[in-house]
Amino acid sequence: MGLLAEGTPLSWEETIQYIDYIKRHGIAQFVNLYHKLKFRERSELKWGDEVEYTIVKFDDENKKVRVSCRASQLLKKLKSEEERNNSLGRPNKFLWTPEFGAYMIEGTPGSPYGGLLECFSHVEEDMKLRRKDIQRLLREDESILSMSFPSFGVRDFTSPPSKITPENRSFGSIFWPDEAICSSHLRFKNLLKNSVDRRGSKIFMNVPIFKDSNTPDPYVEDFSKFGDSQDYQDAKPDHIYLDHMGFGMGCCCLQVTFQTVNVGEARWLYDQLTPITPVLLALSAATPIFRSKLSEVDTRWGISSASCDDRTEEERGLKPLENEDFVIEKSRYDSTNCYIDPSSVAYNDIPLQYDENLYQTLIKGDIDEPMAKHIAHLFIRDPLQVYFERIEQDDAIDTEHFETIQSSNWMNMRFKPPPVDDPKIGWRVEFRPTEVQLTDFENAAYCCFIVLLTRVLIAFRTNYLIPISQVTENMKRAQIRDAVRSQKFFFRKNVMESEETNGKAESGPLNDAEIEEMTVDEIVNGKEDGFPGLMSFIRKYLDSADLEVETLSTINQYLELISKRASGEIPTLAHWMRDFVMDHPNYKHDSEVSDEIVYDLLKKMDSISNGEEHCEKLLGPFHPKSLSDL
Ligand code: ADP
Ligand code: MG
Ligand code: MG
């Protein structure tokens, strides 16, 4: 989740005096970095995924499943192995990092994959071996699942169990115990504390509940046993009330980072992938249950967004501006507000807030206007992680003040400059909206689809730009229950460049007739007499690539899974989970997913994810290979 520096973290009170200093130096660091590295070219496509996992513990006797808060213990072991490899000059097969939840762990390949499409013959295997690397350290009743746990906030949802008393509340939460937050790195608790202190009040969110035939109308929960009404004053009827950062940041996701040839390609690709992010969010939907209740949304996105919302009341527009400079529309975890390539600026139709002085510093530092606006807009957010020992920095070589703000803007895309101290790494972009899938087969398939989209973009110079405000709207729609089937998304009808524009993105804004609202099926698989579909471009690209038969057949399987998910022939994981609950004999059609149902659901998911059981309904006719096949 970003910068994991060591040191003495400052409280919010202590941070305030340094905010201007850090922002000024963060901007100076960016200017230096940009000019130092703007000519860096790396011709090889490299890319890598980040998969987040939840460690669970099954209690077969009582038919309960809990999150197992042992990630720190496991990480200690993994880190010592990693250090040993480093000291012996041996490469690491995988890299492991802590995440927000004490039960979470994030894994990446030991080094990024290379550019040839042949890598898709072993991405899935790599993911399987990665999972095994954790599995060997687990206890018999534990398991590792790439999914977001559906029962956060339910009494005793952690193992070991933790008690929430009025005295022992994690930042006022009536549901979330401190013990469920990662404690091996100070970053996480400090981030939460500073967000809450900056915001000036407890974090909360209300997720619309899915109304089933026996769900009370209106649905109103009685929280009186949790404390006095001040403790849950923000709860709304007909909603699932959540009141802690963990409900969002404790969910798992799948991210993919690509290296580009140069900074220009990175900026262009960042923009071109932005309109695709809502499509992938809808296609990967995997989070339909919150606090053991079925909801009207299918993804973690909006919950993560609200869970990191450190805006003050003035910034949220709830009070007239007195101390703050702006009303800010979005949380720092949300979709991007601007494209960054010069050829895209005509589509930037969201008013951007930024500090004029910081912006002018960028302009005077010879940063062009679109990039200066992007960076200045990121810098409306305050630093939440300041380490006392690292306030004084050398702006000519250090980048930490830039990174601390950059990496705590959790958007659907991220533009990543190369690290100054590692000449191997080029300019990169990160694709961030995707929900993690249950099996390695699916995760490899989603990665493959995203990587191929970047190849197609670069090969054919297609143009997906739509006004950026429509991407924001699409991101909202993508979260709605069964968005793949129920929603339409703004999308460009003609993505091939016209002859006159000669391969350069058109500079003028589109008129309405050039944009259409399309289903995910139409966007991915195409439409008769209309948009040919992302898949058709990928197919065309693959036809021209000289691939080994085996690689091609693996890629074909992945693409078919995505294609069938897009058409609705195979359900999303969210849809599949809902069906499982609805069909469970003990489900009372009251939106409540009991401990026992969650247990049965996760047992089933565990056996599918381990390959013990083939689930035709979730995976279609595709049989993920076992490790021995691979
Ligand atoms: P974060 O998103 O937390 O900043 P990292 O930058 O550490 O994460 O890594 C994200 C992914 O980028 C990993 O999968 C890693 O393998 C991959 N990666 C590392 N180096 C490169 C590179 N030169 N080009 C593309 N991806 C890379
Ligand atoms: Mg992460
Ligand atoms: Mg990442």
Image (tube, grey):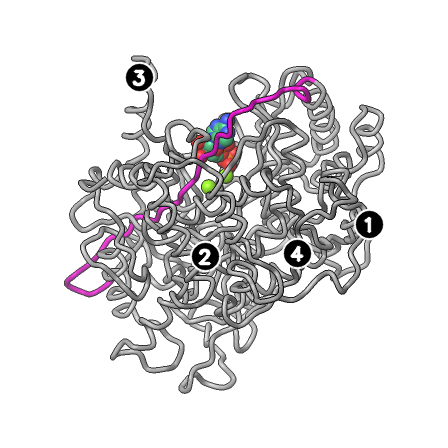
- Identified by mark 3, the residue type is Arg
- Work out whether mark 3 precedes mark 4 in sequence or the reverse, and give the earlier one: 3
Q: Quadrant of the C terminus?
A: top left
Q: Residue at x 20, y 58 (%)?
A: 613
Q: To which residue does mark 3 refer?
A: 90
Front label number (1 vs 4): 1
Spatial CA span between label 2 and label 4: 17 Å
Residue 71 visible in the shown view: no
Q: Is mark 4 within 8 Å of ligand 3?
A: no
Q: Are marks 2 and 1 in contact (CB under 8 Å)?
A: no
In the image, taking residue 279 as reference, residue 542 lies left or right, namely left
Q: Residue at x 47, y 62 (%)?
A: 566
* Helix, strand or loop status at disc 1: loop
Q: To which residue does mark 4 refer?
A: 471
In the image, taking residue 90 as reference, residue 319 lies left or right, namely right
Q: Residue at x 77, y 46 (%)?
A: 506
Front label number (3 vs 2): 2
- Identified by mark 4, the residue type is Val
Q: To which residue does mark 2 refer?
A: 284
Q: Residue furthest top?
A: 88
* Helix, strand or loop status at disc 4: helix
Spatial CA span between label 3 and label 2: 36 Å
Residue 319 visible in the shown view: yes
**Which span of residues is magenta-colored?**
36-64
Q: Of 322 and 566, which appears nearest the observer?
A: 566
Residue 508 shows which numbered tag? Answer: 1
Q: Position of residue 460 (x, y in %)?
A: 61, 42
